[in-house]
Image (cartoon, helix red, strand yellow):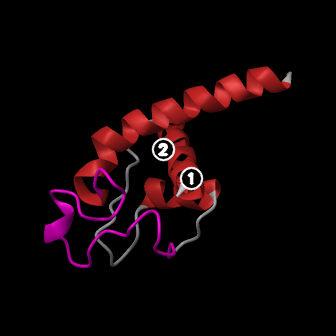
Amino acid sequence: MNSSAATENEIKQISTGKAVYKTACMTCHGENFDGRGDAGKYLKPPPRNLVTDPFIAGDSALEIYATVTNGLKGKAMPSFKLLSESDRQAVSAYIVFVRLKK
């Protein structure tokens, strides 16, 4: 695989991840990734700020994927096994991308 193909695949994955974030994550984590989404303000404990807060279960794409897949016991973060594996991978990559941009 050449590097331009990898870049195209990464761009596609980030784009997919952004769409998944908007439909599955933004309600709690917010448009600005700050944990202040419409539903998030009612959750105890509140959702994590995805840009500045340390992640409980790690912040690599693989660790975020595990959190998205399994949720966090004792926290408001549910499992998102209902999403396809590729959508969970894409949203995990998108969250890493957003953290690195900020």
Q: Answer yes or no: do the residues labelled 2 and 1 have beta carbons within 8 Å?
A: no
Q: Which residue is drawn at 38% across and 33% down?
A: 19
> Where is mark 1, residue-wise?
101
Q: Is residue 55 magenta?
A: yes
Q: Is residue 68 above or below residue 52?
A: above
Q: In this view, does 12 lie above or below 55?
A: above
Q: Determine the secondary structure under disc 1.
A: helix
- Residue furthest to the front in view is 102
- Residue furthest to the right in view is 2
Spot occupied by residue 86 in the image (x, y as percentages of width and height): 53, 34
> Where is mark 2, residue-wise?
91
Give the prevailing secondary structure in the magenta stretch: loop
Horizontal placement of 1 versus 37: left or right?
right
Spot occupied by residue 75 in the image (x, y as percentages of width and height): 32, 75
Q: How far is mark 2 from mark 1, CA to CA?
A: 15 Å
Quarter assignment of residue 9: top right
Q: Is residue 25 visible?
A: yes
Quarter assignment of residue 63: bottom right
Relative to the observer, which residue lies in front, 34 or 12? 34
Horizontal placement of 38 versus 23: left or right?
left
Horizontal placement of 6 versus 10: left or right?
right
Q: Which residue is drawn at 59% across and 65% down?
A: 59
Q: Is residue 97 above or below residue 3?
A: below
Magenta residues (range): 30-56
Q: Which amino acid does the dot numbered 2 rest on?
A: Val
Q: Which amino acid does the dot numbered 1 rest on?
A: Lys
